[in-house]
Image: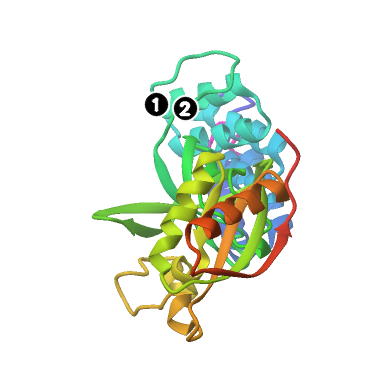
């Protein structure tokens, strides 16, 4: 044993400190947890778990340079640490460090080439929970890579998100949603990665035929926008169902169960400007003369062009 090797006492101390750090982390005492993670790492410098804990805590805080550094340290100590590889990929993506992100996905076993450019991995569609510690709205997204997802729904305005926003998402599944016969894992959003150039407009429409709104969706798609009948698509569900499988237990009805008797529908529209949103509505109203526009307004301004 050399002078720098940890003693048996050091190894035991490192493990006790790690357990204490994890307990404090779980209880939400982040500063104390970080201190004990670092003390554990110092007691056994070659041990990966304390560095993984440090990286996890920095990820939760959105402290991306520190998260990247800590997960690299964990991987230096245990090359096959999948959790550290994944969190390294998230941190690198947040920082737009594409060479590090590609390295992380390779370490995790994904088929991605090395390079400095932004990866386009097309990881399919998935539901993502916006504001997981708040209202927790779940929207459907196209996953650009393991850590980024582009929103395909029109989120409710109070979410602060828009159609085509790109969000940074966590890698740990947190509940499920079903589409057709398939069940999909839900991922929590960590932060807005790139704001969409689309604004969100809302309209109240009176129509005797709710099915005619499919034509409004088609009209919105012609301008690369989106339309959504929030009255029929939004369900307010309890937190327990949101974090599990909301279709497996008790049901939560969509908003149209409470619609008034006049067929009023609450519609979300995604368009680059008000003229575009009004053109969608005007064309649809012209084709459906029995419908009426009751109210129209800008609900959330467009983000900066990314």
Residue 196 seen? yes
Front-most of residues 89 and 8 = 89
Residue identifier under label 2: 105
Q: Residue at x 57, y 70 (%)?
A: 292
Quadrant placement of the C terminus: top right
Residue 286 appears at what percent x and percent y?
A: 54, 57
Instruction: Give the vertical position of 7 relative to 176 (above or below).
Output: above
Q: Residue at x 68, y 31 (%)?
A: 95
Instruction: Give the vertical position of 214 relative to 265 (above or below).
Output: above
Q: How is the image coloured?
A: rainbow
Q: Residue at x 69, y 38 (%)?
A: 64
Quadrant placement of the N terminus: top right
32 on left or right of 181: right
SS at mark 1? loop
Residue 76 appears at what percent x and percent y?
A: 55, 25
Residue 299 appears at what percent x and percent y?
A: 71, 61
Q: Which mark is residue 110?
A: 1
Label 2: few (<14), some or many (≥20) within 10 Å? Answer: many
Q: Do the CB atoms of the residues marked 2 and 1 lie less than 8 Å apart?
A: yes
Using the rendered view, name the quadrant where residue 210 is placed. Answer: bottom left
Residue 162 seen? no
Question: Which span of residues is magenta-colored?
Answer: 44-48
Label 1: few (<14), some or many (≥20) within 10 Å? Answer: few
């Amino acid at each position: 044993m050399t002078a720098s090797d940890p003693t048996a006492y050091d190894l035991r101390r490192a493990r006790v400190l790690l357990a204490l750090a994890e307990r404090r982390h779980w209880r939400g005492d982040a500063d104390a947890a970080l201190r004990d993670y670092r003390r554990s790492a110092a007691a056994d410098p070659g041990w990966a778990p304390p560095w993984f804990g440090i990286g996890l805590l920095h990820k939760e805080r959105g402290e991306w340079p520190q998260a990247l550094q800590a997960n690299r340290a964990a991987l230096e100590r245990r090359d096959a640490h999948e959790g550290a590889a994944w969190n390294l990929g998230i941190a690198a993506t947040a920082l737009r460090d594409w060479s590090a992100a590609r390295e992380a996905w390779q370490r995790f076993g994904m088929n991605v080439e090395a390079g400095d450019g932004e990866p386009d991995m097309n990881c399919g569609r998935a539901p993502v929970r916006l504001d997981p510690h708040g209202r927790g709205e779940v929207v459907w997204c196209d996953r650009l890579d393991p850590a980024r997802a582009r929103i395909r729904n029109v989120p409710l305005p109070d979410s602060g998100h828009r159609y085509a926003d790109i969000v940074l998402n966590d890698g740990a599944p947190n509940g499920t949603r079903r589409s057709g016969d398939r069940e999909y894992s839900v991922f929590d959003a960590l932060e807005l990665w790139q704001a969409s150039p689309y604004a969100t407009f809302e309209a109240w429409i009176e129509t005797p035929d709710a099915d005619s709104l499919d034509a409004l969706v088609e009209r919105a798609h012609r301008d690369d926008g989106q339309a959504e009948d929030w009255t029929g698509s939004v369900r307010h569900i309890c937190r327990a169902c949101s974090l599990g499988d909301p279709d497996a237990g008790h049901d939560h009805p969509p908003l149209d169960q409470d619609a008034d008797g006049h067929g009023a529908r609450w519609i979300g529209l995604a368009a680059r400007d008000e003229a575009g949103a009004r053109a969608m509505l005007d064309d649809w109203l012209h084709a459906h003369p029995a419908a009426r526009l009751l109210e129209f307004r800008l609900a959330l301004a467009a983000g900066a062009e990314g």
